[in-house]
Image: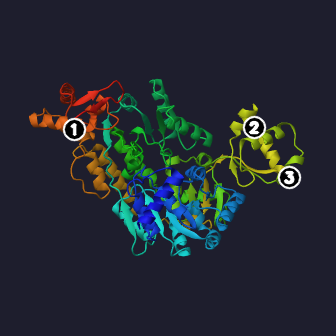
Amino acid sequence: MENRRAETLAVLERYWGYSSFRPLQQEIIMSILHGHDTLGLLPTGGGKSLTFQVPAMMADGLTIVVTPLISLMKDQVDNLRATGINAVFTHSGLSRREQKLVLDKCRLNKAKLLYISPEKLRSPQFISEMRDWDVSLIVVDEAHCISQWGYDFRPSYLQISELRKAFPSVPVLALTASATPDVVEDIRRQLQFRDGHMTYSRSFSRDNLSYIVRYGDDKPQTLLRVLKNTSGSAIVYVRSRRRTRELAQVIQQAGITAEFYHAGLSPEDKNERQNRWKDNSIRVIVATNAFGMGIDKPDVRTVVHYDLPSSLEEYYQEAGRGGRDGKPSYAVVLACNRDKALLSRRLSDSFPPKEYITDIYDKLGVFLDIAVGSGYNQVYEFDFGLFCQRYSLQPAPARSALTILSQSGYIDYTDEISTYSRVMLTARKEELYNLPIDGTTDMVFQMLLRSYTGLFADYVYIDEKLLAYRLQLHENDIYQSLLALGRMHVLHYIPRKTTPYVAFTTSRELPKYVTIPRQVYEQRRDVMESRIDAMKKFTFDTSQCRVSTLLEYFGESPEGGCGQCDICRKKKRVRPSATDKKAIEASIAYLCSHPGGVTMEHIIANANGNRKDISEAVRHMLDEDIISMSSTAEGIRLKKL
C-alpha cells in the first residue's frame, strides 16, 4: 500500500512537478488503482484531472475520458503533450482522416489517454473497434450530465453504458464539481457502479470565499463600486453575448482594464483574451458561462454575477473559480427585483409548449433538407442563426426546443464547436525537394515548415494570422496557398470553423409521431422550477447565512453561520461589549496571521464587528505592538499573540 502511494507521488512529480496532492486526490487515485468504481465530488479548482491522469500513467492500457467540453479537449491534450504524455481526442467536428489517425494510435497502444465526446458512443462501429483496445480506466467527466435530475442532463451520456458493457471489469471514475444527493445516487445507478464502489466528497464550504449579494437597480454603477473596492483579477458573468461587450466598455471607461469573452469569438481571439487575463495584462474578463472551464488561474479575487444563473449548481461552479489559491476572495451577486421575473421567464423559455417543440422538429427537417424516413445517424452542420431568421423564431425558446428534442432521443444538438485550423503533410520527405511550387505558395510552405514541427506524424494546429504576419501577407493569401498545396496532395489542410451541428439519432419522423416523454418535459420542468426557487431563496432571503443555504441545498448540515457573508456581517454590526472587543481583536489577529499579510480593507470586510469598532481595535493592536503595518499593499501582519 505505502509503495503504491509513493509511486503515485513519483508520477505526480515526474510529469507535473508537484510534490504533494490536494485533498482527496490521492484517495481517489488509490481507489481506482484497487479497481473500485469511484465517484469524486471535487469543487471547481479541486484538481479533478489529476485523479485520472496520474493512474493513467501508472497503468499499461488506455484511459478513456468522456467529456462534453469539446472546446476544451484540445487544451487538455496540448497540456498533456507538453508534459510528455501521449494523449489524443476525437469528436464529430474532426475529419474522417483525423479520426482514423486517432483510432490507429489507440489500437497500436501509441496513446495513454483518449478524450471523446459522448455522441461518439452512438456509433456501433466505434464501440466495436474499441473492444480490441487495451483499456485500463473509463472516466466520466461532468458526470452530473448523465442524470435526468442533473442541471445539465445530456441524453448522449446515457450511451456510456455501452462502454460499461464493452469493458465490464474496467473501473469507472465519475467526476463532478456539484451534485445534490439525488443526482449522486442517479450517477451511480446510470453508470452501473459495482459492489465495493467508493465515493469521495469535499465539503461545499469554501472558507476563503465570502458570498455577498448587492441589491440595486443601477447594476452598472454597483458593479463599478465592487471592482473599485476590491483588487486583483476578476470575472464578471452575464447571460448574453451583447452584454459582455457593453459591460466591458463600461468598465474600460471607468479606467479599469477589461475585455469581453463569449463562445462566438474565433479560437484565436479566445486564446489571446484568456492569455492576457491569465498574465494580468487585463484585470477583468466579462464573459458568458462559456468562460472558465479548464482555465487554471488560481488568483481570481472576485467573481461577480451580473445576471443570475438558473440554479445553485451553476452558481457554485462559477463562483468557485474565485480564490482557488486559498486566499480571501469574493463571490458577488448583483440583484434587483426584476431578476425574480426574469428567472420565472427563463422557466417558460426553457419549456415552450409541446406543439411548438414538434413544429421546431418539422422545421429542422425541412431546413436541413432531410426526407421523412431519412437522416438516421447522420451529422449535419447547422446554422442556428439562419434557422431562426428563416422561420422568424425567438432564439431562447427555439434553442430550448432543440434541447428537449435531444433529451427525447430524436436528435443530438450541440451549440457550437470551435476548431482551429490544422495541417498534416501527406507528401513523403523526399518528394518535397521536387515540388512544382513557387511564388507566394512556396513562401507559405517554407514558413509553415519553419514554424511548426511534427507535421509528418500528426495534424498540427496552425494560425493563419501568425503566418500572414511573419510573411507580411494578407490572411487570404495564406488560405489560398494552403488550399493549393492541398490540391497538389502536399498536405491535408482543414480550415478553422465554428459550426453547431445536429445529429439525427432516429430517422426523421412526421410531427404527429413525435412524442415528448413526461420525464423529459413535465418532470424536468418541475425540477428546474425547484432549482430556480432555490436560486431565488439564496439571492433574496436575508434571514439565513448564504453559506448555510448553499450547504443545505447540497445535502450538508451547516453548524452555524459562516461569519463572512453579507448577512452574517450585518448581524455583527452592534456596539461591542468588553467581551466582544476581545472577539473583534481575536478575529483581526486571525486574519493578520496570513503569511502574506492583509490589507486594512480586507480586515474591515472580514473581521467581526462594524467598520468603526474594527478600526479602533486595529489602532489599539498597533499601539500594543500585537500587529505591525509595512509599506506593502498587503502590509498588516500578526507579530505576537
Q: Is residue 153 visible?
A: no
Secondary structure at badge 2 equals: helix
Other residues around mark 2 within 10 Å, as few (<14) / some (14–19) / many (≥20): few
Q: Which mark is residue 476?
A: 2
Q: Is residue 95 visible?
A: yes
Q: Are marks 1 and 2 in contact (CB under 8 Å)?
A: no
Disc number lying in front (1 or 2): 1
Along the horizontal axis of the image, is 490 left or right of 337? Answer: right
- The quarter holding residue 470 reads top right
- Of callouts 3 and 1, the N-terminal one: 3
- Of callouts 2 and 3, the N-terminal one: 3
> From mark 2 to mark 3, how far is it between C-alphas?
29 Å
- Of callouts 1 and 2, the N-terminal one: 2
Which scheme is used to colour this image of the protein? rainbow
> From mark 1 to mark 2, how far is it between C-alphas?
62 Å
Q: Which mark is residue 641?
A: none
Residue marked by disc 3: 430
> From mark 3 to mark 1, how far is it between C-alphas?
73 Å
Q: Are marks 2 and 3 in contact (CB under 8 Å)?
A: no
Along the horizontal axis of the image, is 346 left or right of 263? Answer: left
Instruction: Give amino acid for label 3.
Output: Glu
Instruction: Give amino acid for label 1.
Output: Ser
- The quarter holding residue 614 reads top left
Q: Position of residue 243 (x, y in %)?
A: 48, 36
In this rendered view, identify the residue nearer to me: 94 or 309. 94
Residue marked by disc 1: 587
Instruction: Give amino acid for label 2.
Output: Asn
Q: Position of residue 544 (x, y in %)?
A: 23, 47
In this rendered view, identify the residue nearer to me: 243 or 443. 443
Q: Residue at x 62, y 65 (%)?
A: 508
Instruction: Report the quarter where the C terminus lies.
Output: top left
